[in-house]
């Protein structure tokens, strides 16, 4: 069903448009202002936004700018009782789909909405873009931005620096850049800088000649020679020593390498993609990373978001890993229970996608039924790389529940319902009965919270 967000500071206009559009078969949410609208847009995939221009606080034109910055494909229709040619021109130049003056003809707005929703479906566009990147699972707006950046930078020879937390899939992004590049038929050669002993790093990068050091029984090509005319991927680039950084900088400047123990230089034509989970600007300030090398590598910086910033992709990733490990283990684990999925959606994933994969792999291995239940999930007690000293050795909360014999007299559904009701009540109290605030605390959508509050008759 096509989903529309109506934004207007006049309640009568919001109610009128909602009644009109619901009768036309649309799913409609409303917001009294721009800030509330942006919160809804963060949590819900709308097909269209209809907004008044003149509103208290954030104006409709300011809202338009924020929407186009976050979701360029989302169509926005502007309406106003104060028709201004300047406003109309500004709105259309800045990405508005159309501009309607009040009082408007009902048939006119129906036609505009039909045109806007049929011409540009953000959900369909997201699926279309993500289909070009089968190696990366994601349809969230954060990942769509990554895909669009890959498409723009891949055909160029520009060096790319990918940064992001461990486990976010930086090497997958690097491979996608190579696959969409003009040198896709050439080699993609990866090397993990932290995995190579310091004394061997120069040889691994630039090669060596026979007899140049103990153990060099033959000539050996380095990373750059192997990747000549192709792509070299340097993972964990922040681990390179100052000496190697200096030599790497020369390679990037001169496009030539000299093997360890060699005399002649060899010309190389290599596209460099580097990756790091460190904040290199801080490493530069601390004197551990060369600033000039940073700028050579980061011609195009590209940030891969952590999983907690793209929770909308969790169900897609879960389905992918469920199939992968069910096939691998020869089991018929087809799905995740709704309660188990909610546990995952409320989890921060300090280990990102890699941790989610491990959770699903363990769940499939341990589960005896064809559906993963909460007690089959094993979540880390670590958050952002820090362990809670009071809980690091504690049992999983699900194990504690499973060991409570009295709860078995209630049954799983009743236990989960009571637990959910308690959390909802506590969140509403903590947020001074603000449903939006409670939804943020519980990390669920406003729509989901509203449904649950009604379901349990809370407040």
Image: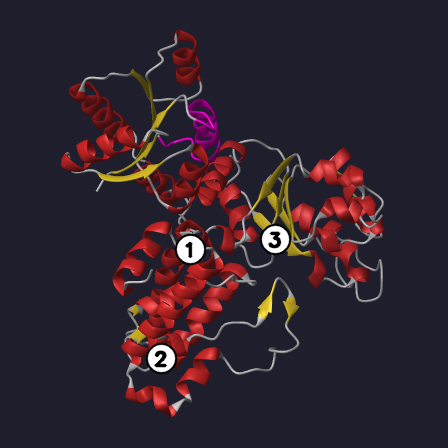
User: From what the image shows, is residue 454 above or below residue 10?
Assistant: below
Counting from the top left corner in percent of width and height, residue 2 is at 24, 38
Q: Residues within 10 Å of mark 2 (few under 14, many from 20)?
A: some
Counting from the top left corner in percent of width and height, residue 286 is at 83, 49
Q: Residue at x 35, y 56 (%)?
A: 449
Counting from the top left corner in percent of width and height, residue 22 is at 18, 37
Q: Quadrant of the N terminus?
A: top left
Residue 367, label in figure: 2
Q: Mark 3: which secondary structure? A: strand
Residue 72, label in figure: none
Counting from the top left corner in percent of width and height, residue 28 is at 26, 39
Between disc 1 and disc 2, whose residue precedes? 2
**Viewer-proximal residue, 370 or 440?**
440
- Magenta residues, as a range? 56-74
Q: Residue at x 19, y 35 (%)?
A: 19
Between disc 2 and disc 3, whose residue precedes? 3
- Residue that badge 3 annotates: 190
User: From what the image shows, is residue 454 above or below residue 279?
Assistant: below
């Amino acid at each position: 069903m096509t989903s529309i967000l109506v934004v207007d500071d006049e309640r009568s206009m919001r109610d009128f448009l909602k009644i009109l559009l619901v009768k036309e078969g649309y799913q409609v949410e409303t917001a009294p202002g721009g800030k509330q609208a942006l919160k809804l847009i963060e949590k819900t995939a709308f097909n269209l936004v209809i907004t008044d221009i003149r509103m208290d606080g954030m104006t409709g034109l300011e809202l338009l700018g924020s929407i186009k910055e976050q979701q360029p494909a989302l169509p926005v229709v502007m309406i106003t009782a104060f028709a201004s040619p300047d406003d109309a021109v500004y709105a259309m130049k800045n990405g508005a789909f159309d501009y309607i003056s009040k009082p408007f003809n009902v048939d006119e707005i129906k036609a505009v909405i039909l045109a806007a929703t049929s011409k540009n479906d953000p959900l369909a566009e997201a699926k279309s873009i993500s289909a070009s990147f089968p190696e990366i699972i994601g349809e969230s707006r954060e990942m769509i931005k990554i895909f669009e950046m890959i498409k723009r930078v891949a055909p160029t020879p520009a060096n790319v620096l990918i940064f992001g937390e461990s486990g976010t899939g930086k090497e997958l992004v690097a491979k996608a850049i190579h696959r969409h590049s003009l040198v896709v038929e050439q080699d993609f050669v990866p090397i993990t800088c932290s995995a190579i002993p310091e004394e061997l790093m120069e040889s691994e990068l630039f090669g060596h000649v026979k007899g140049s050091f103990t153990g060099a029984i033959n000539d050996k090509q380095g990373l750059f020679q192997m990747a000549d005319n192709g792509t070299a991927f340097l993972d964990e680039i922040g681990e390179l020593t100052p000496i190697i950084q200096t030599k790497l900088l020369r390679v990037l400047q001169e496009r030539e390498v000299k093997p360890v123990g060699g005399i002649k230089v060899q010309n190389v034509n290599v596209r460099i993609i580097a990756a790091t989970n460190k904040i290199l600007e801080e490493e530069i300030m601390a004197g551990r990373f060369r600033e000039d090398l940073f700028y050579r590598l980061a011609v195009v910086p590209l940030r891969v978001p952590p999983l907690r910033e793209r929770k909308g992709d969790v169900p897609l990733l879960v389905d992918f890993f469920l199939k992968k490990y069910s096939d691998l283990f020869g089991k018929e684990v087809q799905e995740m229970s709704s309660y188990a999925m909610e546990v995952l959606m409320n989890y921060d994933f300090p280990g990102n996608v890699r941790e989610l994969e491990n959770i699903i792999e363990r769940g499939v291995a341990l589960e005896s039924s064809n559906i993963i239940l909460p007690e089959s999930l094993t979540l880390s007690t670590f958050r952002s790389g820090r362990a809670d000293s009071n809980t690091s050795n504690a049992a999983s909360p699900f194990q504690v529940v499973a060991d409570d014999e009295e709860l078995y007299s209630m049954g799983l559904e009743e236990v989960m319902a009571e637990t959910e009701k308690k959390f909802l009540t506590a969140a509403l109290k903590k947020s001074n009965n603000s449903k939006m605030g409670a939804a943020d605390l519980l990390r669920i959508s406003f729509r989901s919270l509203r449904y649950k509050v009604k379901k349990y008759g809370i407040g």
